[in-house]
Structures are given as structure tokens and as C-alpha cells.
Image: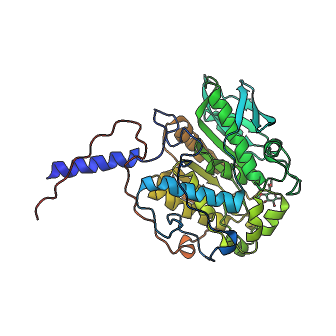
Amino acid sequence: STVVVLAVVALAAAAAVADIPRAGTAHAAPFASAVENEGAGCAVPALPDAGSLPTNARLPDPFQRLDGTRIASRADWRCQRELTRRLAERFVYGEKPAKPTVSGTVSRTGITVNTSHQGRSSSFSAKVDLPSGTGPFPAVIVYGSFGGDTATIKASGAAVISYDPYAVGKEGTGRANKQGAFYTLYGSSSSTGLLMSWAWGVSRIIDVIEQSGGTILKADATGVTGCSRFGKGAFVAGAFDQRIALTMPIESGSAGVPIFRGIPGEGAQSLSSAYGEQPWLGDAFGTFTGGPARLPIDTHQVVGLVAPRGLLIMDNPHIANLGPRSASVAALGGAEVYRALGAGENITYWSDVQDGSHCANRAEWRTPLQQSIQKFLLGTGSAPGAMRISSRAQGNLAEWRTWQTPTLPAGPEPTPTVTATPTPTVTPEPT
Ligand code: MCU
């Protein structure tokens, strides 16, 4: 009868919400996780060898497993995400090691991070700039000098943590002689690229905030942003730490958001140029610069790693070298993962901007930036939830995929944090 139907609908709606990964307690940042990687315990089959990868001119299916089957529920996403994460490490960015021993301090003006691993140790620090009001505050980690709109970040109620990624992974070195706090710990010939080393540094800052007890900064409400090479960095940081509630890459260009497969046709910085300019990508990417069609993943799936957490991709349609068309395809493809997880409104791509100068501070981004901070770091208001793609640089996802987005039934939760209400048995009505 109607009552049964309504009850089932209500249960399904509750499960749909409950299924989105999140921490178990009330949380200002409702989509972030309490842990860096929820899929750490997944049994992932052996990854393919670099030498035996098939060619696929289109974007790989984010929902397909290595054995060719597709995931069938939202709960399946946790281990599919883990597979995606490992493919991205193996073939694109290099490995992000698990948390080493971490200690440090948080004050109203700065953060120190001390790390050690197997007898080696290294440290780095970051500046803190608090907004007005009484804390503890959420915070946005801003990469280096090409950061974001720090005035708007603070005016929105979040602290700014100024992070110098070069202290963790230095530019200007050869691939065999990498330097910085990450490489002091893991070796100067580590095959992990700078973007992932910087992401590791962001995760270690969050470790220190967690360990600080959260009196100045909240550990469960962290965002990350940066422009250009630091947009590449912010994107990778958000993809590889599920504690990050809001990821905001700006004009990231090749090796950032744009699909690797699209770049060659658009006038974007070539993959070999981006790979060679700095050791941003992992050493393993070297065999793909001339043939990205052999990559078993593409950046739409890196966007998917961020799902269902807040993502605001800001892009510049006036500079073809940045690959804005290819970036829009990555956003549209990744948005399909968000949609499948029931979180379509948590991703925004915004390239509808007037000023063409690289890393300009743009008025058009102020409102979506503020809304994103409020929604994902403070837990108030609603997300911008928009695909504002400039007509100057519009990609067409349909040209890039053969797969369709599955309807993924919600629940059951893999690890329930509350006692589950028993699901009633529904007897179909006679016809
Ligand atoms: C868009 O990001 C990079 C670009 O990939 C490099 O080729 C260029 O040298 O620097 C850009 C950047 O970081 O500008 C601040």
C-alpha cells in the first residue's frame, strides 16, 4: 500500500545520504573522512604491467574493475576508489608512502612538522593567519606564492595556512637527485614526483593539526588551493587524502586537471614538456608522454578520487597552453562519479571568467569560493554546484567516453557507525 511505498522511499533516501563516506560524528565538514584513505584495507588485484597495457583512445570507465566487471553499488566504490588510487600512483604520480612518525606544533602564527621514518628525519614549517572571530577555525592550506584569494578565504571564516611546497619537494633537480623533506625521508632517487611529495606534506600538516587537539585549528575541516603548478599540487593533495574537505585547484594546466588524452590536440603544454620541465609527475609517467592512450586511467578518475568531497576547479579559458578544454572534459567525466555517489552538487568547474591573465585574482570566483568554504568547511549554506564552462573552451564528454554512468544503489554502509535499523521485508502486492 501507499504506507509501505512511502516507508521504502524514506528508507532509501536515508540510506542514500548515509552511504556517502564521512566521519561518524557531527562534523562541520560533512563529506570529509576521518582517515587519509578509507580503502587502505581493500584487497586490490595485481596491477597490470606497464608493458602490457591496451590502447584506449577514450577515457577509461571509472566504474570498471580490472577483471572487466563493473561496480554495482555505492558501497563498491570504496575499493574501486582504492584501485583507481593505486593505478594513479603506479602510472602517474608515484607512490605516497603511509604516514611516518609525525610530531609538531600548532600556534596562532605557525605550524611545525617533524617527520621520521627508518632512522631518517626531516622537518618543515608553515605560516598560519587566522581570520577574525573565535576559533577553532577551519583552514585552507595555500600553496606558495601562486596561491588563491586569501582575503576571501579569511573573510569567509577560514584560516590561511601558507605552505611552501618547495621545502618538501624542491624544483630544479634531476629525477635522480630529488631534494626536500620528503626525499630526505624516502631517498633522493625515489620515483615519486614532486606533486605527490607536496601532497604528502599537506597530509603531514593535517596529522599535526589532528594531534594538536584542535583548539586553534579544526582537524576535520581542511581545504587546499593553489594556482598553476600549485594548482596541479592542490588537485593531487585533495585526491590522495580523504580528510581534505575542499579541494580548489586554479589554472592547473598539463599534469593537473586536463585529461592527458586531450592535451595533444588543444595546444596545451605537451605531456613531454610538463614531464620534463620539473619532476612534477612520477618517473613512471615517462613512458606515456608520447602515448597517453595506454594509460589505464585519466584525470577524470583523479577528479573521481575527490568525490564526494567538495571540489571547486577554477580555470582560465583564455590560455590554450593551460588546456582548459581538456580540463572541462576531466571535470565533466569526474562529475559522473559524483553523480553516481549521489553528490553531484559537490563539484563545481568555473572557467567563465573575463580576465585572461594567468593566476589573476578574479571577482567571478569570490562567491563560489565563499560558498564552498561555508558549505564544505563550516557546514552552512549550499554549494555553488555549477558547471560554468566558458564557451571559449568547452569540451564534449560524449566524444570521450563509451561507458554510461551506472545507477548505484545506496548502502548498506560497509562499516556502520550507528546501530542499523533492520530493513523491513516488503512483500510485493498482488497484481
Ligand atoms: C600551468 O603551470 C605551469 C606550467 O605547467 C609551466 O610550464 C610554467 O612554466 O609554469 C606554470 C606555472 O606554474 O606558472 C606559475
Residue 98 shows in the view = yes
Q: Position of residue 415 (x, y in %)?
A: 43, 43
Name the quarter showing ligand 1. Answer: bottom right
53 or 396: which is nearer to us?
Answer: 53
Furthest residue to the left?
430
In this rendering, position of residue 19 left or right of residue 28: left
Q: Vertical placement of 97 versus 54: above or below?
A: above
Q: Vertical placement of 16 versus 398: above or below?
A: above
41 or 333: which is nearer to us?
Answer: 41
Q: Position of residue 374 (x, y in %)?
A: 55, 38
Instruction: Residue at 60% x, 70% y: name it.
Output: 395
- Check the picture and name the quadrant holding the C terminus: bottom left
Colour theme? rainbow
280 or 376: which is nearer to us?
Answer: 280
Instruction: Residue at 72% x, 24% y: name it.
Output: 107
In this rendering, position of residue 81 left or right of residue 91: left
Q: Position of residue 122 (x, y in %)?
A: 81, 36
Instruction: Residue at 71% x, 75% y: name it.
Output: 265
Instruction: Residue at 17% x, 48% y: name it.
Output: 3
